Image (cartoon, rainbow, N blue to C red):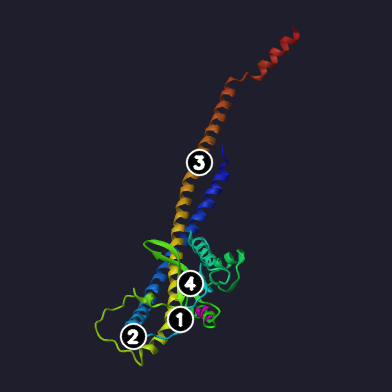
Amino acid sequence: MHNIVDIRNRIKSIRDTAQITKAMQLISVAKMRKANEKFAQNDRYYRRIKSTIKDIFSHMGNEKIEHPYLQHREGNRIVFIVIASDAGLAGEYNHRVLKFAQSEIAKAGKDSKIVVIGHMAEEYFTAQGYQIINSYVYCSQNPTIDDVRRISTLAIDFYDAGEADEVRIIYTRHVNNLNVALSERVVPIHKSDFETATPVKEYKETLTFEPSPIEVFNILVPQYVLGVIFNALIESVRCEHSERMVAMNNATNNANDMIDTLELEYHRARQAQITAELSEISSYQRAKTDKVPYEKVDVRIARQNKN
C-alpha cells in the first residue's frame, strides 16, 4: 500500500505547479495580445515602405537605379542574425529555429558570421563552438526601434565595409496556422523582393516623387532594412508567446490529469487503510470474545500438577 502522506504531498506539489503554469499561460496571452498590436502597427508602416519602393521601381521603368544595397556580390560571406527567446518553456520554438539556423550556417560555410538575439541563442551557439560577433539579450521580449538600430548597424557595417556579401535574418513566422523557421535576406535587396508588395491603400493617381525618385529611394532603403529586422523581431515574439501559451496550457492539463490519478490512488489507499483498521478491530473483538479467562487457566494448570 502506498504511503498516504507521500501521495498527499505529491498532490500538493503538482497543484502548486499547475497554478504556476496557469499563471504563465495567462501572462503569455497578455503578452501575445500586446505583440499582435505592435505587429499590426509596424506592419502598416512596413507595407507602406515596400509599396513605395515598388512604385519607384515601376516609375523608373528600365532606368537603372544605382545603390550599394542593390549590387549583387559574388561570394558566400554571410552575416546571420538569429532570433530566439531569452527564456525556455516555449515548446518547440527555440529548438526549431536554432536547429534551422545551424543547418543554414553549415550550408553557408566557415566564412559566416553570427549575430544572436536572445539568451537561448547565445547559449546554444556558444555551446556548439560557434564564434559570435555580438549578442543581444533581453531585448527580444519587447523590442524597440533603438534595439533594431543597434542590431542593424552592427550587421550592415560588415556589408558596407566589404567584409560580408550578404546579410540574412533567421526567425520564426506564423504561416497557415503553423510556426515555421525561415531565413530572409536583408541586404542586398532585389527588385523581385517588392513584386508581391500590397499597398496600404489603393489609388489610381499619378505619383510624383520629390525631390526625385532616386533620392526618395535612398532615404527609404535604410528604413526598409530597419523594417525587415523589426518585423522579424515582432513576429518572433508573437510566435514565442503563442507556443508558450500552448505549452503552459498542455502542462496545466497534464498536471490536472496527474492530480485526478493521484487523488484516485489516495482514496484507494485510504480505503485500504480504513479496511485494514476495521479488520484489526474486528479481529481484536473476536479474540477478546473467544479468550479463556485467566482464572480458569490457572485452575487447570494446578489440577494437572497435582496429578
Q: Which residue is mark 3?
A: 265
**Which element carries disc 1, helix, strand or loop?**
loop
Give the label, 3 or 4, closer to the camera: 4
Q: Amino acid at mark 4?
A: Ile
Labels 2 and 4 touching (C-beta < 8 A) = no
Q: Are marks 1 and 2 in contact (CB under 8 Å)?
A: no
Residue drawn where x is 54% and y is 52% of the image: 13
Q: Nearer the viewer, residue 222 or 237?
A: 222
Q: Which mark is residue 71?
A: 1
The residue that label 4 is drawn on is: 169
Q: Residue at x 61, y 70 (%)?
A: 131
The image shows residue 303 at horizontal and vertical percentages of: 71, 10
Q: Position of residue 118 (x, y in %)?
A: 53, 69
Left or right of 289: which side holds 215?
left
Task: Tell me the tag on residue 58.
Answer: none
Q: Secondary structure at mark 3?
A: helix
Residue type at mark 2?
Met
Disc on the earlier residue, 1 or 3:
1
Secondary structure mostly seen in the magenta stretch: helix
Q: Residue at x 40, y 73 (%)?
A: 39
Q: Residues within 10 Å of mark 3 (few under 14, many from 20)?
A: some
Q: Earlier in the sequence, mark 2 or mark 4?
A: 2
